[in-house]
């Protein structure tokens, strides 16, 4: 069945939209699958996606959809957590084209923006003027201004600068019926009948909203239209969740950004004590008063003594002024313990703990799943402590667990709860708890939503807060704007039930047969559906840049800007593959294959995603099933089986290198091997590292000093392609007094087989490796692996593929990086040679994600190597950058951080690149020879006695200038 046949009547709609709209119209299964969910518990399947280029496109799309009686859902980054960014009908995606700053007026302190603009881009543009946009949700690196307006978002700094509605001066809006409105103060510009609706219900509007509540986001803000409130139609529109009209442009207010900031971290005995203290700090004029308890951040050592903490940020014109204010806060508090931090890097690290909470809170301490659903209610700040005690008691009464945190200064609490949303009984409990907690919030004078809107999660419960009469008024207000009910139906007015359209109900209940162990997913592990459910949609992977920090995720998204190339997008497609409704071909799905094709398997998401989504593993799993029983791409046979080809070619290295230097022959090899024509074939070492070391050790007695000996792993890349790295490591380890043992036979981590999804072959290789090294396992010696990608494969892929073989975990536990091995085995009084020069380069993405680089940092510091390595990914990523069709994305990844940092470095800087892929990328795209840390250290050692080289020996990959 063709895509057009599958769409049925929607095909005519797609054709008309394509004729009417200049932007992208996409009714494909992939486009629909990518927009079925936001960051909530809900799922709806749209008929298609339109990415308009401008307001005229929006108007044309609305006209066509109205003619077809098709609903429309405006969507930004899809980070809403109440379900309002999901919907049937046509999704309007503003992130592709309508994502610009029209202009900034620093004198008026305003900016004109399009709805798809990412918040951080506005803040970056306003920074040179000393201005910023005040509201800053934790998703500030990817949420859009249109989404913030739709939800009336707030963020950590709302105690100083208010909600989005407080910072909007004007809106250009199109309605489903074709009306164009310019909203600001006053009733003019709105649809007819709004003034009459308000003036006819003044008493209800004056008494129906809670008092003394900084954050009342629930329902429509009709009280903003009261005469004593100044009649602000733009303000009343904020928080309408795309149900009234579609924003095409907005005038937003900017505020002065403090020149300096400091952070007072206050420790309290428990959560209620911290909550009760928060309100008392507000008269001191803080920028933020954020709270969290120890069950959200277990094991964090950087916080003051206590069981709960307040993060209170202060600002000033000078660093001393900001710090003085923070110290005044600490002094005025009744905290158990305090700390004042004004170092920007330290503050960023602390704020990251808080910002990642929206993801980390989705896992309970024992690894169970926790979900939104009662995510962000708000009560008067003075009532927060009492509310939290009652909230915890209600959780316990229902047998539920959650970890509250959030904006204590505004009385707004975030929490993820371990609802069972897979069984009928669990869903019934979810509903019962939601009804009872709504009554509790109202009893404390609060709002069901204090930040993210009502969506489907809470709109059904609005009568408990406002009463039937005021909720009825909401329906009348909606009808004035959208009498046809075409905009985001099921939200706010006439809402769907809170237990309908749950995203988990379409997933298979039986465990899916898979190859990897997924030990942390599902009860007892091994549940691929649970692994896919890890992605909750907070979309940290959609951040356009790492900001110069160490993050890696998600290089392909930053290169293309396409949702399908983000970690979240790929997880969504896998979810729909399991559901089988939109993506119907299961493991054979071309939509999923195409999305995963540009996944670099960098493993960055394994560490940078707040919930630890591991897309590299999911990709390997998918490729295994996708190509089962049928031919694979040529690159899988060429580069996926690289170890066996290199072993076969080793005796003929000279001839192979000579042939690779003949362009016509090299072109044929690349074409047959599925290799990008732009790539140079790497040169084979004429003497492998393993052969060199055995020749070197011949006749020498190896002393196995307890604690001073390590197994040196001859990985494929070091052995056949860069033996100079291995030789350098041997020199440094010997100089450090570390004995070296080689495995007694051929070993391989199986990386290339795993990354291409040849998992049966990977298992065979891994088992043979375990058989070889088994005699060494009992000795307990650290296994030093010079290639980070191989070390990561031995640490993660090996035990997760061979779950039933205890030797796999034993070997994984012994794996060390070069620096870790030196730190563990060298005598305490050993110091590396002193170089006293700057370094530049990039931490290997697998090392960042799996192994960590703390030991490497310490080793560099002891050697006098100064400076920071960049984050991101080099873009070569093993076979990825060599495969035909990947060159442009591979190069774009390198240009994101690595190559610019190397070009900007001083001539004296040592270019560090511990991975063979990183060194190859530097050589082929930058003309620079990167070196392993072992090489840099070895060159500073006293000259070793010259050794007679093997016949015809040549160095490994040494192309490019040496730095």
Image (cartoon, rainbow, N blue to C red):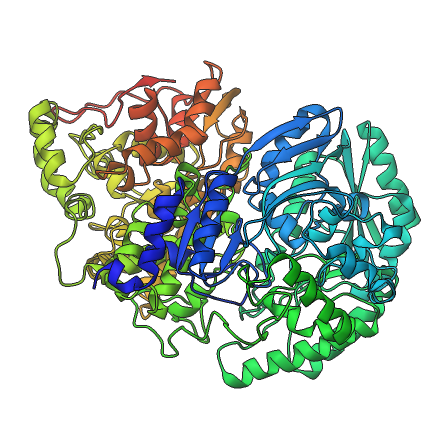
Question: x and y percent of residue 924 in the render?
Answer: 28, 25
Question: x and y percent of residue 21 in the render?
Answer: 40, 43
- In the image shown, does 495 or 131 lie closer to the viewer? 495
In this picture, is 600 found above or below 486? Answer: above
- In the image shown, does 802 or 428 lie closer to the viewer? 428
Query: Is residue 43 found left or right of 267 in the rendered image?
Result: left
- In the image shown, does 471 or 267 lie closer to the viewer? 471
Query: Is residue 789 found left or right of 365 in the rendered image?
Result: left
Q: Is residue 514 visible?
A: yes
| Identity of the residue drawn at 60% across and 78% down | 430
| Identity of the residue drawn at 62% across and 71% down | 494
Q: Is residue 767 visible?
A: no
- In the image shown, does 464 or 129 lie closer to the viewer? 464
| Identity of the residue drawn at 41% across and 25% down | 899
In this picture, is 237 found above or below 660? Answer: below
In this picture, is 884 found above or below 946? Answer: below
In this picture, is 339 found above or below 667? Answer: below
Work out which quarter of the rendered image holds the C terminus and state it. top left
Question: x and y percent of residue 427 in the render?
Answer: 55, 80
């Amino acid at each position: 069945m063709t895509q057009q046949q599958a769409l049925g009547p929607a095909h005519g709609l797609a054709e008309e939209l394509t004729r009417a709209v200049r932007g992208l119209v996409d009714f494909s299964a992939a486009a629909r699958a990518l927009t079925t969910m936001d960051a909530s518990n809900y799922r709806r399947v749209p008929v298609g996606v339109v990415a308009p280029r401008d307001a005229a496109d929006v108007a044309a799309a609305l006209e066509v959809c109205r003619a077809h009686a098709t609903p429309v859902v405006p969507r930004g980054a899809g980070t809403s957590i109440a379900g309002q960014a999901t919907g049937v009908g046509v999704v309007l995606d503003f992130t592709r084209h309508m994502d610009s700053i029209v202009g900034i007026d620093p004198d008026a302190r305003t900016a004109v923006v399009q709805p798809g603009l990412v918040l951080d881009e506005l803040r970056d543009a306003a920074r040179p003027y000393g201005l910023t946009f005040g509201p800053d949700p934790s998703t500030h690196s990817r949420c859009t201004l249109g989404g913030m307006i739709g939800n009336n978002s707030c963020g950590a700094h709302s105690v100083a600068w208010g909600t989005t509605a407080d910072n909007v001066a004007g809106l250009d809006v199109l309605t489903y019926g074709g009306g164009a409105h310019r909203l600001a103060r006053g009733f003019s510009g709105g649809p007819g009948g709004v003034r009459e609706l308000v003036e006819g219900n003044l008493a209800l509007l004056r008494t129906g909203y809670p008092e003394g509540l900084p954050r009342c986001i629930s329902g429509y803000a009709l009280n903003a239209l009261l005469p004593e409130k100044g009649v602000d139609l733009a303000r009343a529109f904020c928080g309408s969740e795309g149900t009234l009209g579609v924003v095409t442009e907005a005038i937003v207010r900017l505020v002065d950004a403090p020149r300096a900031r400091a952070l007072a971290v206050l420790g309290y005995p428990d959560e209620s004590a911290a909550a009760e203290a928060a309100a008392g700090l507000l008269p001191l004029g803080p920028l933020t008063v954020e709270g969290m308890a120890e069950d959200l951040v277990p094991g964090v050592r950087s916080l003051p003594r206590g069981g709960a903490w307040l993060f209170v940020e202060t600002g000033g014109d000078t660093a001393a002024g900001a710090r003085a204010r923070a110290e005044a806060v600490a002094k005025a508090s009744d905290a158990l313990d305090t700390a004042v931090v004004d170092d920007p890097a330290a503050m960023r690290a602390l704020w990251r703990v808080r910002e990642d909470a929206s993801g980390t809170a989705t896992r309970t301490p024992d690894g169970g799943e926790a979900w939104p659903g009662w995510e962000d209610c708000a009560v008067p700040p003075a009532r927060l402590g009492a509310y939290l005690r009652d909230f915890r008691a209600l959780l316990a009464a229902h047998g539920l667990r959650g970890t509250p945190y959030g904006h204590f200064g505004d009385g707004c609490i975030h929490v993820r709860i371990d609802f069972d949303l897979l069984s009928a009984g669990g869903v019934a409990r979810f509903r019962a708890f939601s009804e009872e907690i709504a009554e509790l919030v109202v009893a404390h004078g609060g709002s069901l939503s204090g930040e993210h809107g009502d969506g489907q999660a809470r709109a059904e419960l609005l009568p408990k807060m406002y009463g039937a009469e005021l909720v009825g008024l909401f329906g009348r207000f909606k009808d004035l704007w959208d009498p046809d009910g075409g905009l985001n139906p099921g939200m706010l007015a006439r809402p769907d039930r809170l237990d309908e359209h749950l995203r988990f109900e379409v997933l298979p209940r039986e465990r899916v047969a898979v190859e990897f162990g997924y030990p942390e997913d599902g009860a007892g592990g091994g549940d691929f559906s649970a692994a896919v459910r890890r992605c909750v949609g907070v979309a940290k992977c959609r951040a356009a840049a790492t900001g110069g920090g160490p993050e890696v995720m998600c290089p392909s998204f930053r290169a293309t800007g396409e949702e399908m190339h983000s970690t979240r997008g790929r997880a969504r497609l896998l979810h729909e593959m399991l559901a089988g409704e939109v993506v119907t071909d299961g493991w054979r799905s071309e939509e999923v294959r195409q999305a995963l094709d540009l996944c670099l398997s960098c493993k960055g998401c394994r560490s940078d995603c707040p919930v630890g989504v591991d897309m590299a593993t999911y990709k390997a799993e998918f490729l295994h099933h996708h190509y089962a029983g049928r031919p694979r791409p040529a690159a899988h046979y060429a580069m996926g089986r690289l170890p066996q080809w290199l072993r076969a070619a080793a005796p003929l290295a000279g001839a192979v290198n000579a042939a690779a230097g003949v362009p016509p022959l090299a072109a044929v090899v690349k074409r047959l091997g599925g290799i990008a024509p732009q790539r140079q074939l790497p040169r084979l070492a004429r003497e492998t590292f393993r052969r060199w070391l055995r020749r070197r050790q011949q006749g020498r007695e190896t002393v196995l000093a307890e604690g001073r000996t390590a197994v040196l792993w001859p990985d494929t890349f070091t052995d056949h392609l860069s033996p100079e790295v291995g030789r350098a490591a041997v020199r440094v380890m010997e100089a450090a007094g570390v004995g070296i043992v080689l495995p007694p036979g051929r070993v391989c981590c199986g990386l290339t087989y795993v990354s291409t999804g040849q998992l049966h072959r990977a298992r065979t290789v891994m088992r043979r490796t375990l058989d070889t090294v088994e005699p060494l396992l009992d000795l307990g010696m650290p296994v030093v692996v010079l290639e980070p990608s191989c070390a990561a494969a031995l640490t993660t892929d090996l035990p997760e593929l061979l779950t039933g073989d205890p030797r796999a975990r034993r070997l994984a536990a012994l794996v060390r990086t070069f620096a870790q091995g030196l730190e563990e085995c060298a005598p305490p009084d050993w110091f590396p040679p002193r170089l006293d020069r700057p370094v530049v380069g990039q931490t290997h993405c697998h090392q960042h994600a799996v192994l960590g680089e703390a030991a490497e940092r310490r080793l560099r510091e002891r050697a006098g190597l100064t400076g920071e390595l960049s984050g991101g990914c080099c873009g070569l990523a093993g076979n990825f950058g060599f495969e035909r069709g990947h060159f442009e994305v591979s190069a774009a990844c390198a240009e994101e951080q690595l190559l610019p940092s190397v070009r900007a470095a001083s001539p004296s800087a040592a270019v560090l690149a511990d991975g063979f892929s990183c060194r190859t990328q530097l050589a082929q795209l930058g003309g620079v020879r990167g070196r392993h840390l072992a090489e840099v250290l070895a060159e500073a050692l006293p000259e070793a006695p010259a050794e007679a080289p093997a016949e015809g020996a040549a160095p490994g990959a040494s192309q490019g200038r040496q730095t």
